[in-house]
Amino acid sequence: ASTLTTVLQSPLSAPFTLLDVFLVVHLLLATTGADSLVSKAAVRIFSVSLPSRPVVVGNMAAQCSLSTLFPIQSQLDFALDEAATQQEKENLVLQYLKKLDERDDLKIPDFQPGLEWLNTEGPLFFNKELAGKVVLLDFFTYCCINCIHILPDLHQLEKKHSVKDGLVVVGVHSAKFPNEKVLDNICSAVLRYDICHPVVNDSEAYLWHELEVSCWPTLVLLGPRGNLLLSLVGEGHRDRLMLFTDCALRYYGEQGLLKSHTVGIKLYKDSLPPSTLSFPGKVAIDNSSQTLAIADTGHHRILVVSTSGQLLHVVGGPESGKRDGDLSEASFNSPQGVAIKGDTIYVADTENHLIRKIDLLEGRVSTLAGVGAQGTDKEGGAMGPQQPISSPWDVTLGTAGGVEDNVLWIAMAGTHQIWALFLADGKLPKGSESKAGTCMRWAGSGNEENRNNAYPHKASFAQPSGLALAPEESWNCLYVADSESSTIRTLALKDGAVKLLVGGERDPLNLFAFGDVDGKGVDAKLQHPLGVAWAPEQSLLYVADSYNQKIKVVDPKTKQCSTLAGTGETGNTLGPDFNKSSFNEPGGVCVGNGGKLLYVADTNNHQVKVLDLASKTVSLFPISMYCTDSVPTKLSGPAKAPTLPKSAARKVMPPVAVSAGQTLIISLSLSLPEGTKLTEEAPSSWALTAEGNEWLLDNQVITGDILDLSKPLSISTKLPTVMKESNGNASLSLSVWVYYCMEAGNACMMKAASFAQPLQISATPGEKEVTVVLAHAF
């Protein structure tokens, strides 16, 4: 830090440029948990973009970038490190804020007009909607694991201080990959990570360049005049972030400069209909039992489904949590990787930083590794429940110096490593004996790099996100989808040597060698691949090339990488051929039926798709849990239906007499305008709720898909056997969201309708069933 301060405070004649500063910052950030832009391409970019543009404030030109702030803030940082008490720290920050207020050269440029905004009713500007607010800018890109790691800090901050209190958090999305510049993809990330503050798509990184930001994530705290107060780079700064924000709100509140007005928050997630799956991250298969395990990531649960689509178990969800116990009580937080063998499922419980085990025979969930909070240890070696880990993204079973499947390999995205969790006694290649339960690093230095090496601890990965085991003698390796380097790597089971298979480039520091090019080895280019699957019968590796919206196939013998399916454009079409099918950031893939079928977790389309490798056709994998002509399955735990659009038709039906314990059947006929048809790819759906009388549905929201309007939908629910007092006002609401297109294909639309069904509850037992007939024409 002292070196950096010296550089920044040097006179103009000193042989330092802002590019030199950037390189120094990169070296310092090696331990701060930040994604840096150091690469050949990045250096070229920043040698042009780093010089800041002067902005006139009053009568003086102000270089309002982070380089102006660094020398001032560094003095405070040193003082805070020496402070012994919280009161001393608060006094130091308040003195610092007073000093900054004496300067008029720290006001930053405003957001450009015309940018795309999410979670707001319209654009926000520092001199209008954000005036009189303390604003925290979060410069992020949604693929970045470090950016994901600080979201809990932001959630905690927003819970503590509201917009009315004077704090507004704004996510400034500054993309790394071209795919991340697309608004729809950012929308999906906002939903997936439950981001509830305003987000702006600064696709050309205008504000990033103006402020000379160099790493993801970077937090920038602003005062009520849009003036720079603080910058924090990387993750792990929760205490300092809380201290600064608390003090800034206190200081400007006492100055009378804070305003309590709202800024027009409108959450994107409130406008969406329910769906069977929500951002499924991974899918795994046990071919012996013909059973699939699906990580229904957005619903925080694991689905166990037969290959015919019959739902067998729902574990967890719909809300996040980290509870062990019975299947009906257990909870997860955005689980990703799954591995299934017989009646046991291993789960990478990503945002809980845990490895979990689902025992279907015993009907219980237990924790095998992790402490429930993000760890920073890059060595490991403790027993699983005492070993902190960081954002496990995928898991697969393997064998290491012991009985078959005695180890669980883990793609530890948070520390950029591959770890091992011993399920029985064993031994890593060229390692010492390890007892059952030991959790430790196998490969990866912990530096975020694309570095291959014969020694596993000297190799480096960049956010490994997918694993596939090829134990056959000819291959004898673990394939790794290394997402941030856009490569597929091999990790030898014999000695731990790490080698490149396809993608990337030879410079280990260049994490920007991505693209969409079929070819051999390093000549092939991928874009943020998240999943891999091995087909032993054909000796082929399948790759979910996520940001290229494709499924690719690699012949490891020749290192030839070719496109198998996908147009390269974001979409949700089923063909008829592989090259006419489209995906939306597919994150997981597994091989079934002896290498004849490929199951794909099409994450942002909220679907699992099946690729028939013989007929070269793509179909949706049917999951019968929300079948509309049978009793629907209730989600485990309370849920909330999405908000209906203002244009939705609303009908209040005549009251119907019901009795305790009766089954209420709602028969709903829907008809579309002439010349239109239901959109097969869109998630038309319904939801049955009992707002104000949640006990009627056991505190659940019952949902289902609408697949066919040629016959009435039949929705049934069993009323409680013991009725509560309701003063005759009990009511159910059935809402529908229907997507349909003109048959000519030139326009598509979504319409919604809601039916309020009052209930007259009788204490006298009635018939076993009572039927209500509803109809609506759009």
Image (cartoon, rainbow, N blue to C red):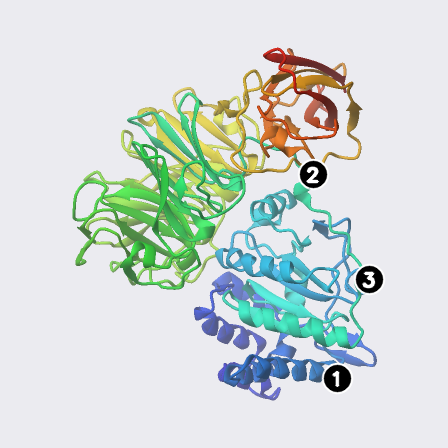
Left or right, 155 with respect to 615, comes to right
Residue under label 1: 102
Q: Which three-letter amino acid code belongs to the residue tagged 3?
A: Lys
Q: Is residue 572 visible?
A: yes
Q: Position of residue 244 (x, y in %)?
A: 62, 73
First-in-chain label (1 vs 2): 1
First-in-chain label (2 vs 3): 3
Q: Residues within 10 Å of mark 2 (few under 14, many from 20)?
A: few
Q: Which three-letter amino acid code belongs to the residue tagged 1?
A: Glu
First-in-chain label (1 vs 3): 1
Q: Residues within 10 Å of mark 3 (few under 14, many from 20)?
A: few
Q: Is residue 554 visible?
A: no
Mark-to-mark CA distance, 1 and 3: 23 Å
Q: Please determine whether, in this image, residue 232 is positioned above or below residue 459.
A: below
Q: Position of residue 127 (x, y in %)?
A: 81, 65
Mark-to-mark CA distance, 1 and 2: 45 Å
Residue under label 3: 128
Q: Which three-letter amino acid code belongs to the residue tagged 2?
A: Ser
Which residue is rendered at x = 54% and y = 27% of the image?
Answer: 580
Left or right, 71 with respect to 676, comes to left
Query: Considering the numbered disc 1 on the image, is that residue within a helix, a strand or a loop?
Result: loop
Residue under label 2: 271
Q: Please determine whether, in this image, residue 338 is positioned above or below residue 457.
A: above
Indicate the quadrant containing the C terminus: top left, top right, bottom left or bottom right.
top right
